Amino acid sequence: MSNKTSNLFYQSRAPRPFLDRAEGIYMYDQSGKRYIDGSSGAMVSNIGHSNPNVLEAMKAQMDKSTFGYRLHFRTEPSEDLASMVAERMPGNLDRVFFVSGGSEAVESAIKLARQYAITQGKSSRWKVISRFPSYHGSTFGALALTGYDPLARPFDPMMRDMPKIAAPACYLDRDNLTDEQRGLKYAELLRDEIIKQGPETVLAFIMEPIGGASTGALVAPDSYYGRIAEICKEFGILLIYDEVMTGVGRTGSFLAANHWDIEPDIVAMSKGFAAGYAPLGAVVARETMVEALLDAGGFLHGYTYAGNPLACAAGVAVLKEIDRLSLIDNCAAMGALLKSRLEGLMERYPFIGDVRGKGLLLAFELVSDKDSMTPLPKEYNCYLELVELAYERGLIIYSRRTRGGVEGDHFLVAPAMIVNESQIDEIMGILIESLDALAAKFDLPVNA
Ligand code: PMP
């Protein structure tokens, strides 16, 4: 087949091979070459590809109906899925609003927050504080919250940028603080920003509990999470957790919020929710909040495809598979193993400056000097180079060159939650070959 394509979906000048089929953590192109899906796509295919029970459930739903507009019908899959989500959420988060992706989920979360504030007589509140760097999506509302200049700045004249505080990139700090003190230091940035903006104008604070595309699995010190929640409470500001990437088990708990016993006011989820079987996302909030909105005439927001029965049937089946196979436990166990294996690489490759993450949302970062955490030269383009070296060898990983303030090459390693020990060996084997090749190409030091 020709390399020329009219499909704008492919943004790369050098098109990737055609995908033929995928099963479990493996994907095959049309030439028959096998790839380990070491990043679950973009942290999406959390239960692996071609799960027969999910496919069966989707086929059964397809035979019944594939669309029912929400103003005309309720559907069993969306009702069932909403109850299953509510059962798994912390505290009183039991009202679910379905969408078809992560940006839609974030967009819906901030509109829900704003409309709720109006019902409470707080229409002066509209600013949503977020973090820098961060990633919250590509639609204008979500982009205004996204702390990543190359994506956002071209659209400045067309949107209202929102205030940002520094993400807690403590691994770059060179101070004498303890982890706990650092966590508190970064949390206080929120308090300062609220005061600077004027608390009566601040609607919400949104954060990725564990960074994803922007910061490469950045986990804050434990003290950060509770203090942020306290500050939001103090000023009556809604706390929104963007769990689009971290939700539905990926970090070894249903929500990342569970690791710190946080009950956010609003949670956005997508990616692993229908795990790549259908476009699906959700916003979850408390009954009291949603009832206030409904009393005031309803949520002024909605997407035609929301609650699509086929997508919801996939979502139900995915949650059932996660339970049946105890995938969240497996994710925690395999995540701990993979993390220790990645940490083990730091001895051989002194240019690995940091390994971080939780569950199977793990990352490593490359540096030219570990003490100062100086990034590798930009012109090396290591974030692309290593991905290519691994891809050639049949391993897919995900990379970005962003971090707090300065740039740095980081790589997400996030296989599906079904991964087993021998597959982790396979991933590590190819990763080591790829890092050796990278070191040879740029003359980076390797310890025997
Ligand atoms: N929020 C977070 C934390 C994400 O990681 C992403 C996607 N990388 C989004 C929102 C946007 O999701 P989508 O691409 O499905 O619109």
Image (cartoon, rainbow, N blue to C red):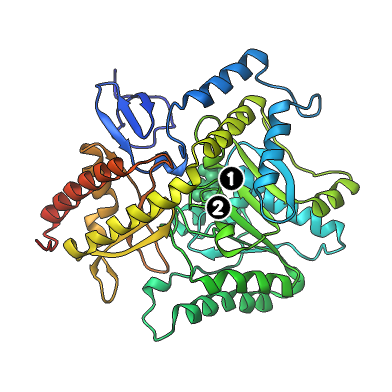
Secondary structure category for the residue under label 2: loop
Q: Residue at x 53, y 80 (%)?
A: 185
Left/right placement of residue 448 relative to residue 277 reads left
Residue 264 seen anywhere in this rendered image of the structure: yes
Q: Which of 329 and 26 is in front in this view?
A: 329
Residue depicted at 62% across the width and 25% down the height: 310
Please state if 140 lies on the left or on the right of 345 as rendered: right
Q: Cβ(mark 1) to ligand 1 < 8 Å?
A: yes
Which residue type carries mark 2?
His
Residue 25 x %, y % = 36, 35
* Residue bearing the label numbered 2: 136
Q: In which quadrant will I find the C terminus?
A: bottom left
Q: Which residue is drawn at 57% across and 44% down?
A: 102
**Residue at the bottom extreme of this rendering:** 176
Q: Is ligand 1 within 8 Å of the beta carbon of the residue shown at mark 2?
A: yes
Numbered mark located on residue 103 in the image: 1
Q: In this view, does 333 lie above or below 343?
A: above
Is 220 placed above or below 139 here? below
Marks 2/1 in contact by CB < 8 Å: the verdict is yes
The crowding category of the residue bearing disc 1, from other C-alpha atoms within 10 Å (few below 14, some 14 to 19, many at least 20), is many
Residue 6 lies, in percent from the top left, at 41, 24
Residue at 58%, 34% (x, y): give it: 320
Is residue 304 visible to the viewer in this orientation of the structure?
Answer: no
Q: Which of marks 2 and 1 is nearer the N terminus?
A: 1
Q: Where 280 sits versus 402, above or below?
A: above
Q: Which label was assigned to residue 407? A: none
Location of residue 105 in the rendering, given as x and y in whole percent from the top left corner: 63, 45
